[in-house]
Each structure stands twice: as C-alpha cells, then as structure tokens.
Amino acid sequence: MADGTTKPLDEVEVGDRIYGTVRSGPYRRYVQTSVLAHWSVEKLAYRVTLEDGTRIVASGDHRFLTDRGWKFVTGSDQGAMRRPHLTTNNKLMGTGAFTASPVRTADYKRGYLCGLIRGDGLLKFYQYEREGRVHGNQDQFRLVLTDGEGLERAQRYLLDFAVSTDRFLFQEASGRVRRLEGIRTQARRRVEDIQKIIKWRAEPSVEWSKGFLAGIFDAEGGYNSGVLRITNTDAVIINQTTRSLEQLKFSFVIESPSGNGVKPIKVVRLRGGLREQLRFFHSVDPAIARKQAIEGTAIKNNCRLRVVAIERLGTRRLFDITTGTGNFIANGVVSHNCYARRTHWFLDEDGVDEWSSKIFVKINAPEVLRQELARPGWKREEVALGTATDPYQAIEGKYRITRGILEALRDFRTPVSIVTRSPMIVRDRQLLAELAARAGVTVCISIATTDPTLARSIEPTVAPPAQRLKTVERLSSMGIRTGVLLAPILPGLTDGSESLAAVIESARGAGASFVGHRILYLGEVTRDAFMRFLKQSYPDLVRRYQRLYPGKYAPAVYEKRITGIVDEQKARLGPLEPRYLRPPREAEQLELL
C-alpha cells in the first residue's frame, strides 16, 4: 500500500492507493498508483515458489515480471499455448516476501511511546520557590510533531494506559516552516504515569523492541535517496536502537558525521537495501507514512528470487486488480494486470485499425454468466464491467448483452461496478436501481474534458461531456452510486489546472459521489495509433509525447504533479455533494433447512 503498510489482496478496494512500477531510463521504478477495479474468479491455480522462500498462488494466465521480461505462469514452447512462461531458469523482479505486521500488544505500545517521547518529547519536573505559595513546582509533558499520524497514535496509546492529553497548535505554517501540532498535559499524576510507561527495559521483549524502533524512527528517523537512518545525540537512545535492531536480526552501521558539537551526533544506518528497509517498515510499523515512501526507487535484480518450483494446486478462488500503472506489487514481486487490446492478438487482429472496425459479440454471455452465478461456491463478490472494453458500445442497442448480464446479476443478488463513457446506460436505470437495492451498484462515467470541441477531437465517437454529466445526474437521482473518472488525462491537452478543475466542478454540480483520475497509458499497440492521431491533429505535441513517454507510462514526477493538482482542486471546490439516497435493501429470503 502507498502508506507503507500491507494488505491481503482480497481486502484491497477500488480507490486504494498502492505501489506499481513504471519504466524510467534504464530501470523500472516504484510509483504510487490507484486501484481502478477489483475482482475474483475461480480458476486452476499454481503455487510459484522462489529461492528465498517467497510463495505466490496465481492462475496459469497471470504474468509476473522476470529478468527476461513479462512471463505467464504456464505455457508451452509450441502449439496453442505457445507463449512466454516461467521456468526454473527465470528470476522474478522485486524484493521478495513481505514481513507480517507487529501485534499491537501493551508491550509494543510502551515501546512505541518510549521511542517517540524520548526521541522528540519533553518530560520534566520543575522545582522552585514561589512567593505566597509553598512551592511553584510544575510537571510538564509535551510532544510536538509536524506529522499528525505520530501524534494521533501517541495520544491513542497513552489513552489506552488511562493517560489523557490535550491537542494544541504549537506553530502555524509559515513559508518553508511546516505547521506544528502537539499533545500535552501538566497534571502531576499523568506526567508521572508517562514516566513509568516509557521507562527503559533491562530485557526488552521482541514486541517492545518493535514498538521502540517504530517510535524512534517516527521521532528521529528518515528515509531519503534509498537510505534509512536514525539519528540522535543521546548515547543511551543510540544504544537501545542498535540493541533492538540486533534483536530483530537487522544489519546496520553506526556513523559519526563531521562536526565538533558538545553532543556529537550518531547515525544508525540500516544495511541490506530496499528488501531490508521494507522488512523494517513492515515488521515495526512506524506511523508516519511520509517517511516510508519508496517512490522513484529503482527495482534491481539483487534478491534471491529465482523460480525453484511451479506446483499445480487445483481450482482456487483468486483475486486480481486493475491499476493505473498496469501492474502492482504482490508479495514483493511485480505482478501484471491486463489491458484490452493485447487480448485481441490471439484473434489475429492488429489491435490498431481492426480494433475500431470489428467487434466480437459473445451473444451467450448472459446465459454463461447465469451458470457461473448458480454454482454453490459463488459468494456474490463484486463483478466489474468495463475494465477491458466499454459495455455500452453502440452495438449494445441491438444485442442487449450488457442488459442481460445486469439482469443475471440482479437475480443472483451480485454487486457490480461499471465503467463507461456512454449515456446508453440510462436505458437500464430502472434495472440498475433494482440491483442497487438488492446488492449494490457503482457506476463510473469517464470524462476527459468539459470542452465540447476538444472532446469531439479526442473522442469523436463518444457523446459530448454535457450529455455524460447529465447521465451522472440522472443515475444519482435514482439511488445509484455514480461518479466521474477524469480520464484519460492527456498532457498538453487536458492536464491544465483549469481543465481539471472544470471537470471536478461539473461532476460536483451533477451530484457525483466521487471523482477519480487516470493519466494516459500507451501500451505496445495503442502507442502507434495514438501517435498517428497526434501527427494528424496536434503535430506540435508529438515531440513532447515522445520525450514524456519513453515507455508505456508518463514519468512518476508527472503523475505526482497531476495528482497534486487534482487533490488541490478537490480541496478548493469543497466536498462532493452526492444527490442520491441509497435505496433500502430488500429483505433477504430465508432458506429452508
């Protein structure tokens, strides 16, 4: 996940921020991206075991990044299944298996508070005479940080030990100085309790040491340019840091930067590269996400990830996602999710000209779906429509296949998410309302710009933006959760702050429940078609795109800038005001035993 934590793939949700990868120069690098779709399927599964013990369960059709490019789990060297596939000569790319998060025991919480407060807090007892009183003694605890995650965790953990504190503003943001907030108390009993909570341990438990490392990293640690460091001038703190690292079997070095201060600075630097750095983040779990960002770090082939076994397991429930980068990190290795045009190669289509001139109609899709939904093992997981191609293409008006699919999902009380650019979906609004009441519906309408002239140029066969916004409004008013996908964002065409703000503001006015965004992706096949379009319609942009897209994705720095603009415009325009009221759920029918 983008915040430095891990999550089982079946618990990932649409909209989550995670890490994917993009090609940048000679290396593929980690970048943050969004989950656009999530689904599951029952298929024949295989267990892939790697040299370091990492294990991954996937279908034979899934692909992983190897030292020799993308490869399917299974395949053959000839015949119908001829395709690049894994062998024991391959090595997967990434860091290898993730480490489990720590258990939040009382010992872990004490260790965290000890590291954070001793590293960055103030805990003092002042004694002095005061005229007119027996004494003027004061007891004070104060912890001030620039990151709210650390404060919130500290305040929550202290409350777990029956110590309440007050939140306060220490310093407002000014220029390059960040906003500082803090927690404090001056009650003698509470200050004394905090002193007891953070006392040093002669023989700390493993959980206490994990908490201590998380706390001291939040207070005095940093992760910059691929290096993880913890810095302090207190010899006792440095000693406890190294003891805790040794207890968890981390390798490190102690460095002394040049300088002749009264209290010389000591730096504890973790060794072992990204694999060990991620093990540190996952096993101790610091609170501050900013300090755990691996954005831009190169993926290097220096881990023991050679394939040692591929075992057939039988049919399993498997989970997959679609992301903005086309890939994601599964148990420490780079995992692929597919895009539609590549799926037409096996039909001998060129994916460019014939893609727009031929449609393969699966006229029995609703019947086949009903058979699948009727299986005893079906647990009504959400079904995603539109992750490969638009389910409301013009030919749907004749064949009504999407409608038949929705009827099947309604009858089997199965939730659905739909991505489309077509107002034709309004035809099925009553059916969608019924499905929303029975199981749940999310509709995502793609809108790249509100400028009708530009929209006609980049999407000549699609309804104008105003009509699509009207679709959002009509569906929302019927109790159907509907939002806008600001996509594709085209550099030099639709990526200006005014253009992005116009879509967000229009979505808000139409009663959208959410606004997501996605930057243009240029796959192996689509690249030629899009560059041809640019040469014909926007020749001045050709060189810019050639520089910006050396691979399939825009650079991470560009994606980060666009995400910043979108987030800024959302904050400026205020929260969305959905107009829909979710219809009441239908009563479940009781089953006779």
Image (cartoon, rainbow, N blue to C red):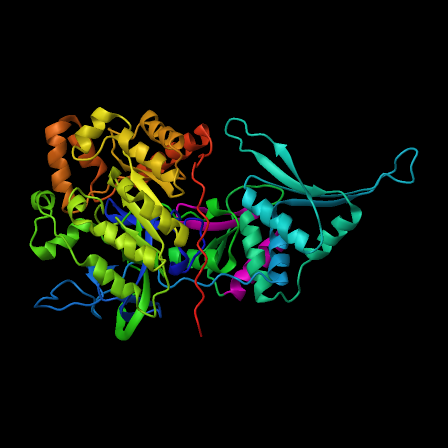
- Which percent across, then down, holds residue 527? 15, 42
> Where are the magenta residues, as a range?
219-248
- Which percent across, then down, holds residue 276? 42, 59
Quarter of the view holding residue 41: bottom left
Q: Quadrant of the C terminus?
A: bottom left
Q: Is residue 559 above or below residue 336?
A: above
Foreground residue among 158 and 504: 504
Q: Is residue 592 above or below residue 579?
A: below
Residue shown at the point (36%, 54%) measured from the top left: 415
Magenta-colored stretch includes residue 97 = no
Foreground residue among 413 and 97: 413
Q: Left or right: where does residue 263 sit relative to residue 358? A: right
For the question of whether residue 69 can be seen, the reply is no
Foreground residue among 241 and 457: 457
Disc tally is: 0
Quarter of the view holding residue 108: bottom right
For the question of whether residue 248 can be seen, the reply is yes
Q: Left or right: where does residue 355 sit relative to residue 31? A: left
- Which percent across, then down, holds residue 458? 19, 32
Residue shown at the point (54%, 27%) measured from the top left: 174
Foreground residue among 521 and 391: 391
Residue shown at the point (20%, 43%) measured from the top left: 522
Q: Is residue 101 above or below residue 556?
A: below
Q: Left or right: where does residue 226 sit relative to residue 258? A: left
- Which percent across, then down, holds residue 419? 29, 45
